[in-house]
Image: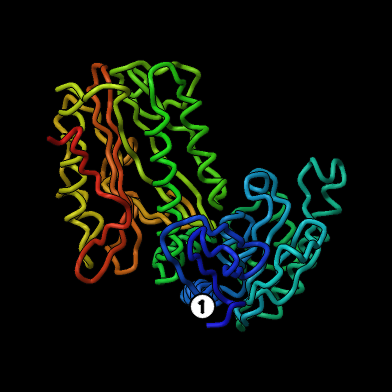
Amino acid sequence: MSSASAIVARGIDQRDQVTYSSVSDIYPPTYTARYELDIERLHRYRVARLHAEMDKRSCDALLLFDPVNIRYATGARNMQIWTMRHPARYCLLLRTGKIVLFEIGGRAHHAAGLPLIDEVRVARPWFYYYTGPGAPVHVKHFAAEIADLATSARSGLSKTRIYVDRCDRRGAQALEDFGLLVIDDGQELMEHARSIKSEDEITAIRMAIDVCEIGVGRIREELRDGVTELYLWSKFHQANIELGGEYIETRLLTSGSRTNPWHQEASQKQIHAGELVSFDCDLIGPLGYGADLSRAFVCDAAPSPVQKNLYRLAYEQIILNTELLQVGKSFREITENAHYLPHEYHQWHRVAHGNGMSTGEYPAIGRRPGYEEGTIHEGHIEEGMVLCVGTFAGRKGGGEGVKLEHQLVIRSTGPELLSSSLFDPDFCT
């Protein structure tokens, strides 16, 4: 394996020996663990997954605006958070194999060293901040260029079929005006392509989990009477950025009575001795891969019997539900046979969910409010899926709550845990 196609981390004491695949994918070698992955092989696997899904759907061209989807298809990273709101860049994959990245200002350096991008062009976004009243002109230029490229990949059908992950009405109409058949199922295509991970991807996910668990350790180290929730959360963010991670998708760290109900965000509330602290990491780490772990600690005290019982309920539910995740099991069967908490507790809306370049990916196994009749997704467990299993244990009437979650990969022999054990002797003995 050449140094140009590998990222190798050998620890702080051998920092000078580290090589990087490109300026887009640098991460600092500040780990004591050892990683080795082939970046070009990782990219080729991902593009092959996309082409397989395109072939299933007779898709001539795939147009992507979601920055996470662009990252998966090309490896190129550029202002990920900003472009989640502002569709300023996009990429086009043709059934013929060509990949064209449309960057803000045509900045080719974001694609430097990435092996599968054939061409970088100037993006022509039409959202109001960029174009003001000139949007009708800009969107026409955008659509004309995409149509010119896409029609070259037509499979012989009456119209070129272009799948799009997300595009506003003006953009979709402009593409149709240039004779393309626009199909808005691009996100479904992407989710299914991303659902089965290669061993290189699993290595990248292990890297993210290691960064995440270092951050979790810093939360535990800094937890003391009088600190605020936001202070603790800032320490977690710092660890991620310092160690080559990218961003955190949520702000879920709460303490005391704010732990129940779940999904409140971190605040300036001071944490006091004896209070429970629960958090959900939702971390995007090195190379853009995610770690979705949840943990609970008690501030400056041993857990009370009530806190131990909450932890035990959550822990046992996760362990029992993890055992259900066997290759070939249907999502519906898993949902029906899952272990649920007693009726006086809030019911968590997922048995398990996928994780990769986002902390929430296909599949979503379980029920949500409004979907009580069955699972959101139909399908079955496949080898190579990376899944997270979690829950929340909190009484409907109030009090504190425990949020727990771990991450695993599905093997032919069953689930293999990627994150550390949830067994905590402070709570479990």
Q: Residue at x 62, y 77 (%)?
A: 4
Q: How many callouts does the rendering have?
A: 1
Q: Which quadrant would residue 428 be assigned to in this image? A: top left
Q: Crowding at label 1, few (<14), some or many (≥20) Cα neighbours within 10 Å?
A: some
In the displayed structure, does residue 328 sit left or right of residue 37?
Answer: left
Task: Identify residue type, mark 1.
Answer: Arg
Q: Residue at x 68, y 50 (%)?
A: 79
- Residue 286 position, x and y percent, is 53, 56
- Residue 123 position, x and y percent, is 78, 59
Residue placed most toward the observer, 143 or 280? 280
Residue placed most toward the observer, 408 or 56? 408
From the viewer's perspective, is residue 99 above or below residue 251? below
Check disc 1 and report its element: helix, strand or loop: helix
| Residue 135, visible in the rendered structure | yes
Question: In the rendered image, which residue does mark 1 sit on?
Answer: 41
In the displayed structure, does residue 125 sit left or right of residue 370?
Answer: right
Residue placed most toward the observer, 181 or 59? 59
- Residue 201 position, x and y percent, is 44, 66
Q: Residue at x 62, y 83 (%)?
A: 156
Residue placed most toward the observer, 218 or 354? 218
Q: Which quadrant would residue 26 be assigned to in this image? A: bottom right
- Residue 148 position, x and y percent, is 77, 73
Residue lying at the far front of the rendered structure = 13
* Chosen colour scheme: rainbow
| Residue 58, visible in the rendered structure | no
Q: Quadrant of the C terminus?
A: top left
